[in-house]
Image (cartoon, rainbow, N blue to C red):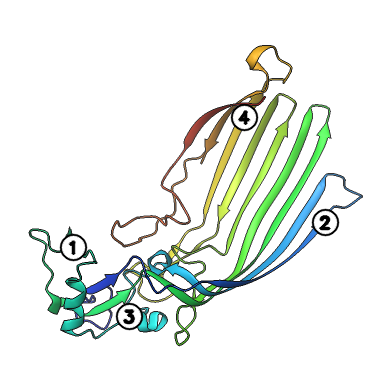
Amino acid sequence: MTNPASPTGTTSTLLLDGSNPNLQPEHANTYNAGLTFKPLFLTGLKVDFDFFHIDYKDRIDRLINDNYFANVITAADQLGSLVNLNPTLGEVSALLNDPDRRVFNLAPFCEVGMPGCIVNPASIGAIANIGYVNIGVATVQGYDVDARYDWDTGVGRFYVDATGTLMTENSIQITPTTASASMLNNAGDPLRFRGKANLGWSTTKWSVYGRVNFANAYHNRLDPNCPVLPGCSVSSWTTVDSGIAYTTPKDTAGIAGGVRIAFDVMNLFNRDPPYANVPGVLPLAYDSLNANPLLRVLSVSVTKKW
């Protein structure tokens, strides 16, 4: 794992993952407040504004899902007692030979104990628990906005809507004695802002829509090529979706009534996900939490209502 203090820049580390029989119940205090605006002078407009704040205590979390993997040594101040930077040979040997624990070597990938797969206990310089634990304190806070305006015309009904989520905090303090760490606006973490805007038109039979999706720019502190925080920059990502649908009248004879046939195009302009070097067991060139590798996707759906 990455270790700037090591002459080689890395240290062989034993990562512990999986179940934990010592887990305790988790607790949370949740606060929500909302405001809805529907002006009489502009019929068809509705704006919802919501605030949320959640304080978790003893939240059950799997730390590898919070991107504690290749960075466990550099993040030792956040993991506290979950990282042992000076394990004894006996501690390492006990874990490697535990009959209830499966051990895998990641380079090359193989299960320790199988023919040709051997790990020298003396080569292990650190032990880190990245499995299920009770996190001391976790806080999530932000705002949701949903605005919509629709109006009737002689040629159908039009609508415009926009939704967005602005997160102002997403932090964890893994143990009572360790530093609080922000899990916001970094690769593998929730983004500070996501939003989408729609424009649509519909009649009793036809409907058409176009949608713009936006995810803000952020940083990738997992990339070893940018060891200085906040890490490598990851570009914002804007994609466009569109679709058209036809619905038969319910009173159409036979089973043809109430049938909806839709044709949708996701990522209409074939935008690549922004590049992000995410190391791991299966290294990726994109952030799987905040993007996907699919380019333009065409789909046809048929639904029937009775």
The answer to which of marks 1 and 2 sits earlier in the sequence is 2
Q: Amino acid at mark 3?
A: Val
Q: Nearer the viewer, mark 1 or mark 4?
A: 1
The residue under label 1 is 107
Q: Amino acid at mark 1?
A: Ala
Q: Residue at x 34, y 55 (%)?
A: 284
Q: Residue at x 38, y 83 (%)?
A: 80
Q: Secondary structure at mark 2?
A: strand
Q: In this rendering, does residue 124 appear at all? A: no
Q: Is residue 6 above or below residue 44?
A: below
The crowd level at tag 4 (other Cα within 10 Å; few <14, some 14-19, many 20+) is some
For the residues labelled 1 and 3, the Cα–Cα distance comes to: 21 Å
The crowd level at tag 3 (other Cα within 10 Å; few <14, some 14-19, many 20+) is many
For the residues labelled 3 and 4, the Cα–Cα distance comes to: 54 Å
The residue under label 2 is 37
Name the spot of residue 192 as percent of width and height, x first: 57, 65
Q: Nearer the viewer, mark 2 or mark 3?
A: 3
Q: Amino acid at mark 2?
A: Phe
Which residue occupies the foreground of this view, 279 or 253?
Answer: 253
Name the spot of residue 21 as percent of width and height, x first: 37, 71
Q: In this rendering, does residue 223 appear at all? A: yes
The residue under label 3 is 83
Q: Amino acid at mark 4?
A: Ile
For the residues labelled 4 and 2, the Cα–Cα distance comes to: 30 Å
For the residues labelled 1 and 4, the Cα–Cα distance comes to: 49 Å
Left or right? Give the position of 64 relative to 139.
left
The residue under label 4 is 244
The answer to which of marks 4 and 2 sits earlier in the sequence is 2
The residue sitting at the right extreme is 41
Q: Secondary structure at mark 4?
A: strand
